[in-house]
Amino acid sequence: TERAPTGFDSETGKFLVFPRPSAIPAASGFIATDSKGNAWAPYDDGVVKLDPRTGKYTDYPLVTKGKVTYGLDVDREDNVWITQPTADRLGVIDRDGKVSEVVLDPLNTEGMGITDKDREISSTIELGRSNVTPLQKGPRRLAPDMNGDYVWVSEYFADRLARIDIHTKKVKEFP
């Protein structure tokens, strides 16, 4: 059974319960808080925010739907970042609630022995939590630099690290 999120009011000594309305998707896995104390959690098509001061939930659908999310964090300017490993992209919700995304460049496969036939087969594979192609970067697990202007993201399947500028969304990759 699903339990409603709870909190604790240290002034009154009482537990608070925040029942999720049925119109709001169930989220799980990763939870992060912003500077205002809002809790953020992903689901495969978006992110849910809970404002513990009001008990209000807000749903933020991602630009690219139907892909796995795996990792969420909040940068120093209260922008929320969500990884979508099977789509090679990150969703971004800026502090004003605008949803956008950062699409990673395709993996450079030069010298890897990847053939046109491999690319053809890879294009027919339905990606999931446990299966990917050799052409995927697979961004997951991210960490914002709370003293700088970057979000660092592991490209799990490509054995790389990406650094994304939180203002320009420019990506720099490191082997």
Image (cartoon, rainbow, N blue to C red):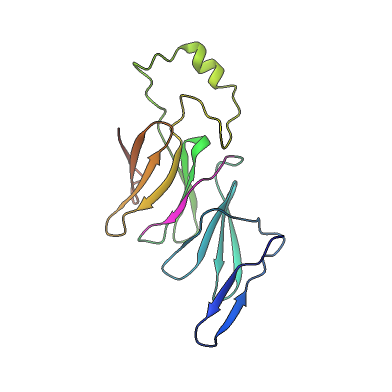
In this rendering, the answer to whether 106 lies above or below 34 is above
Identify the main secondary structure in magenta: loop
In this rendering, the answer to whether 40 lies above or below 152 is below
Count the marks. 0
| Residue 19 is one of the magenta-drawn residues | no
Q: Residue furthest bottom?
A: 12
In this rendering, the answer to whether 31 lies above or below 9 is above
- The magenta segment: 67-75
Q: Residue at x 59, y 62 (%)?
A: 58
The answer to whether any part of residue 80 appears in the image is no
The answer to whether any part of residue 96 appears in the image is yes
Q: Is residue 24 left or right of residue 107?
A: right
Q: Quadrant of residue 169?
A: top left
Residue 151 image point, x, y percent: 35, 49
Q: Residue furthest left?
A: 147
In this rendering, the answer to whether 36 lies above or below 167 is below
Q: Residue at x 41, y 61 (%)?
A: 78
Q: Residue at x 60, y 77 (%)?
A: 16
| Residue 74 is one of the magenta-drawn residues | yes
* Quadrant (top left/top right/bottom left/bottom right) for the C terminus: top left
Residue 11 image point, x, y percent: 50, 87
* Quadrant (top left/top right/bottom left/bottom right) for the N terminus: bottom right
Residue 45 image point, x, y percent: 60, 47
Residue 99 image point, x, y percent: 50, 51
Q: Residue at x 37, y 24 (%)?
A: 108
